[in-house]
Image (cartoon, rainbow, N blue to C red):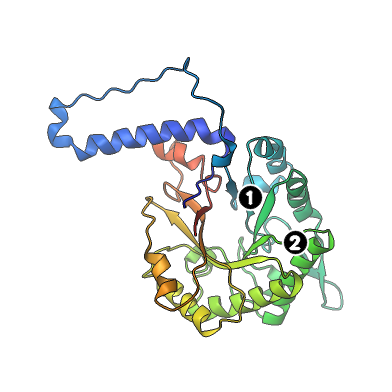
Amino acid sequence: MYILQLRRNVVVILILSLIFALFDWSFNSSKVNAANTAVSITSNYATNAGNYDKTKLLNVARGGHLTNKNLHWLPSYYDIMAADGIDMMRIDWVLSDQFYHLVSRNGSGQLVYDFTMLDAVVLPLVQKGIKPFMCLAYLPSVIDGSGVSGIGYPTNLNEYKAIVQAVVQHYVNLGYTGWYWESHNEADASVGGSLSSTQINTMYQYFATGVRAVDSAAKIGGAGFANNKATNSKIIGFMDFIKANPTIPFDYLSVHQYGGADFNDSLNALFTSRGIPQKDIIYSEWNYDWTSGTAGSVKGKHLVGQNLLSLLLIP
């Protein structure tokens, strides 16, 4: 089963984009017959096709766009999202200093936490009945996250685990359990630090065991791979690691898909060939491609849905 989530205020644009894209594909695939081919598209807005089916609109995701530095912008859409039947939203960049300034050190060098900014985005969401899908990328500067995003490998893995646990514990203390927790965002690509397989796997071990120790009901997975191909050496290494360490919590594999809907069963084979019980495969980002287009272009229209049209689930 494939679950494709949309967001209300981009539905019309995305439908039109699909029509334009299909027209463009049809045109280019039959250029040799273009002179003898007539294409006609009609629409009757007076026709009532029935009530809008909210079950077709399940999950959305927000990315690291700087608009989100305004902590009031995203919550201003929660009423619309709830009315449209959104069940879950992916919140990225949780540990990065870019948006939430979650962790710092006091004068004694101890880790201290401030959830004020993160709560401003998360708590209004859950109060509307929408469950967060929490992606704990990237790294805070206190454990060597570098650059704007906070990419890199933690200087202290125990402190990394402690930070992960502090975030989960904060929401458990508020009465929220059973959320989805994702370890990485594109750690196999330059945007995520181009980490090695060993680094990704080691971080995942500390992440997953840390989350499970706090919330036994949590859905734990990763690693948000940019390259979703079954030939990706980082995914292969990750699945080999999962096979070799069956006690490490692992509820789903997450990957990203840009540049064509070539979803297939090749990733499922990574489970069956290793004797790993089948888990969900979550496309936690999906879109036409990852770049922006010019205003009014088909690519530009698709960009409207980037990180808002997301989270495909293959059980």
Tell me if I can see residue 295 in this picture: no
Name the residue at 42% across, 34% down. 17
Q: Amino acid at mark 1?
A: Met
Residue 193 image position (x, y, % from top left): 53, 69
Q: Nearer the viewer, residue 200 or 191?
A: 200
Name the residue at 56% across, 45% down. 308
Residue 133 image position (x, y, % from top left): 64, 56
Residue 283 image position (x, y, % from top left): 50, 57
Q: Is residue 291 left or right of residue 126?
A: left
Q: Is residue 189 left or right of residue 23?
A: right
Which residue was labeled with disc 2? 177
Q: Nearer the viewer, residue 160 or 23?
A: 23
Which residue was labeled with disc 1? 89
Q: Mark 2 falls on what kind of element?
A: loop
Name the residue at 36% across, 54% down. 262
Residue 240 image position (x, y, % from top left): 46, 80
**Above-or-below relation of 220 to 132:** below
Q: Most extreme residue toward the right, as rendered?
A: 107
Quarter of the rendering containing residue 149: bottom right
Cα separation between marks 1 and 2: 15 Å
Which comes sooner in the sequence, label 1 or label 2?
A: 1
Tell me if I can see residue 307 in this picture: yes
Q: Amino acid at mark 2?
A: Thr
Q: Nearer the viewer, mark 1 or mark 2?
A: 2
- Residue 301 image label: none
**Above-or-below relation of 132 to 137:** above
Q: Mark 1 falls on what kind of element?
A: strand
